[in-house]
């Protein structure tokens, strides 16, 4: 039986962010946003979205694009982006968040792409694929695993054949990028008690502004924004395993649950409590227990 979305109480906004046991490795978001603004963030896996009504303004590293109905957005893993409404009435859309492994499996079966697979374009006008994205949502919400998995694989196959590419292999990093990578490791390891920018630069033998420039060049956002995004990601993993939001907040370094609520809702699109409840329903439906 289909579950209803979570209302936000603002301008008729609503959202549902969930995973469907019938298609392992896939998260889904269906929502209508008006005033909600997604800050600069990135994802571990892919983002594939199709707007049904309204306009979404999507800010990518190379500029802002307006996403209209009939368009499909393809964002590769770890690419920073932000989004907000492009018209006063906002936008409603469906988004698929497949894991890297899931996309790689499809690519290996139906393409000749080798290495790390991704997409060459960010946005294309493709009403047929946009309809497939929405069909995945409709089938999943109806509990039809066969239809959901079929529509998902057809959509991914179509996008890979038309827009897929092998992403460049990473060579040796220049000195500034190595410094940024070390800074990221330190922030990830000391997430609950991170150093100041000055202290972090001192530990790495550089200056604060040099570190700031190197980090933004490498990851598309300054260290403090990256850390907030990383904390929310880790909180998602904890909520997936059944951790209570208040406990997750402390475990990832937020001062309290309201602090987690604010940042989690802005980045993920739904509050952490609603996110956790949807995961619990998924595990119950699948007859599994979070590990």
Image (cartoon, rainbow, N blue to C red):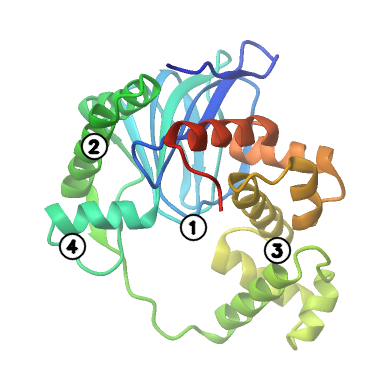
Q: Earlier in the sequence, mark 1 or mark 4?
A: 1
Residue visible at 53% across and 26% down in the picture: 16
Residue visible at 64% across and 55% down in the picture: 234
Are dots 1 and 3 in contact, CB under 8 Å? no
Residue corresponding to mark 4 = 113
Residue extending farthest to the right is 255
Query: In whole angstroms, how far apart are the C-alphas of marks 3 and 2?
Result: 35 Å
**For residue 139, side relative to residue 201 (left or right):** left
Q: Earlier in the sequence, mark 2 or mark 4?
A: 4
Which element carries disc 4, helix, strand or loop? loop
Residue extending farthest to the front is 287
Q: Position of residue 215 (x, y in %)?
A: 63, 69
Asked whether 159 or 3 is in front, the reply is: 3
Query: In whole angstroms, how far apart are the C-alphas of marks 1 and 2?
Result: 21 Å
Q: Compared with residue 234, is residue 174 higher up or lower down, i.e. above or below?
A: below
Q: Earlier in the sequence, mark 4 or mark 3?
A: 4
Q: Residues within 10 Å of mark 2 (few under 14, many from 20)?
A: many
Q: Earlier in the sequence, mark 1 or mark 3?
A: 1
Which element carries disc 2, helix, strand or loop? helix
Q: Position of residue 172 (x, y in %)?
A: 44, 86
Residue visible at 23% across and 31% down in the picture: 146
Residue visible at 36% across and 26% down in the picture: 140
Q: Nearer the viewer, mark 3 or mark 2?
A: 2
Are dots 2 and 4 in contact, CB under 8 Å? no
Q: Which mark is residue 223?
A: 3
Asked whether 12 or 39 is in front, the reply is: 12
Residue corresponding to mark 2 = 155
């Amino acid at each position: 039986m289909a579950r209803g979305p979570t209302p936000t109480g603002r301008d008729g906004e609503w959202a549902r962010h969930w995973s469907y046991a019938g298609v392992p490795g896939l998260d889904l978001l269906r929502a209508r946003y008006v005033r909600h603004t997604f800050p600069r963030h990135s994802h571990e896996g892919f983002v594939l979205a199709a707007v049904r009504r309204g306009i979404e303004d999507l800010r990518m590293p190379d500029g802002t694009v307006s996403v209209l109905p009939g368009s499909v957005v393809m964002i590769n893993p770890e690419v920073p982006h932000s989004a907000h409404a492009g018209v006063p009435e906002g936008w409603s859309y469906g988004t698929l968040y497949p894991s890297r492994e899931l996309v790689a499996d499809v690519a290996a079966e139906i393409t000749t792409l080798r290495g790390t697979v991704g997409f060459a374009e960010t946005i294309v006008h493709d009403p047929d694929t946009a309809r497939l994205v929405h069909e995945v949502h409709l089938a999943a919400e109806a509990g039809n695993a066969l239809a959901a998995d079929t529509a998902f694989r057809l959509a991914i196959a179509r996008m890979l054949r038309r827009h897929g590419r092998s992403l460049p292999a990473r060579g040796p990093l220049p000195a500034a990028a190595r410094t940024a990578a070390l800074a990221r490791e330190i922030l990830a390891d000391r997430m609950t008690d991170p150093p100041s920018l000055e202290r972090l630069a001192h530990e790495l033998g550089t200056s604060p502004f040099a570190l700031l420039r190197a980090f933004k060049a490498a990851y598309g956002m300054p260290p403090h924004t990256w850390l907030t995004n990383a904390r929310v990601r880790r909180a998602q993993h904890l909520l997936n395993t059944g951790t209570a939001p208040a406990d997750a907040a402390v475990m990832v370094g937020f001062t309290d649950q309201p602090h987690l609520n604010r940042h989690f809702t802005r980045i993920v699109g739904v509050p952490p409590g609603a996110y956790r409840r949807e995961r619990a329903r998924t595990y119950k439906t699948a007859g599994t227990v979070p590990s």
